[in-house]
Image (cartoon, rainbow, N blue to C red):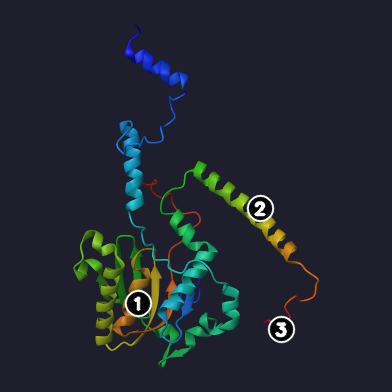
Amino acid sequence: MRHVSFIARTVFVQNNDVEAAFRILNRILGREGILDQFRRTRFFEKPFQFRRRINFERCKAIYNEDMDRKIQFVLRKNRMEPFPGNP
Amino acid sequence: MLPKQFLATFRKLLTCQTKVMQINETRSFFMGAQRFRDVIDRKEMLRSVPKMDEGSVGEKVLDVDTLIHQKGDIFPDADTPNRLFNGIPFKNLPIVNVRVSPNNTIVSMSDDKGVVKLLRSCGVEGFKNTRKGTNIAAQATAITLGTKVLERGIKTVRVRVRGLGPGRMSAVKGLQMAGLEIVSITDSTPVSWNPPRPRKAKKL
């Protein structure tokens, strides 16, 4: 399904700040993985390389999930604010 | 009497010195077999080569959702095509297409229908071969095209970028430096998740 031209993947330029708008655009595309997919399709990725990459991404996702859980757990607290008055 | 060679090896074995380096011994850069030398040289060479600019500056970091909440008018919505910019509806604004590749950048101006009016590339500017694939060349090309567009009487444009390469950001910057008012930046890089089989990977 094709995205609509000039509605999808578009960022408006505010106050003639072209660099900021471009950076936002690149950020979104990079985070979504669109630029990575583009780079991947420049050369053929052999099946063994594909499997290696997918397995690595799976392991990374599992690790990140567990690490995030750990961090959220460690950040839990129910105590008096030790430094009251600080922002 | 045993030959000197045998004595030397026997001594080395006794003192377990076959593979251990002496403290004062320094390894020469050119020691070793030919293939090791090639590997070392190539690694040094690859390390000394500067990183290629893919033009995706600003790819990491930032939370986009907070952006949308804070500044809602950064992104277009359903009524954007009819929104007026300097008296012209968005859908009637002329388009500047920036086609970016690792070795070159082509900038062209077309009307809202898509009919190309002007076309400039880094080669036309006077750059040759590798120098075409630089951000400076892209900026220069964009500046000349920008001035030509202004001569035609067009002041507000929307930009459409295609591809990844050195000239991606600098071309748009060059257009702005020429004096054009850029309303929006669109990315129309052709991305496919099941493309026809691309060429094999380059040998590194």
As drawn, the label of residue A85 is: 3
Local secondary structure at mark 1: helix
Local secondary structure at mark 3: loop
Q: Choose the circle earlier in sequence order: 2 or 3.
A: 2
Q: Chain of mark 3?
A: A
Whole-number angstrom distance, CA of label 1 to CA of label 3:
46 Å
Q: Quadrant of residue B160?
A: bottom left
Q: Chain of mark 2?
A: A
Local secondary structure at mark 2: helix
The residue at 48%/78% (across/down) is A11
The residue at 50%/69% (across/down) is A27
Q: Looking at the image, which residue sits at the far top?
A: B1
Whole-number angstrom distance, CA of label 2 to CA of label 1:
41 Å
Q: Is residue B166 left or right of residue B130?
A: right
Do dots 1 and 3 share one subunit?
no
As drawn, the label of residue B173 is: 1
What amino acid type should be assigned to the residue bearing mark 3?
Gly
Vertical position of residue A61 compared to residue B35: above or below: below
Q: Looking at the image, which residue sits at the far bottom?
A: B87
Vertical position of residue A75 compared to residue B74: above or below: above
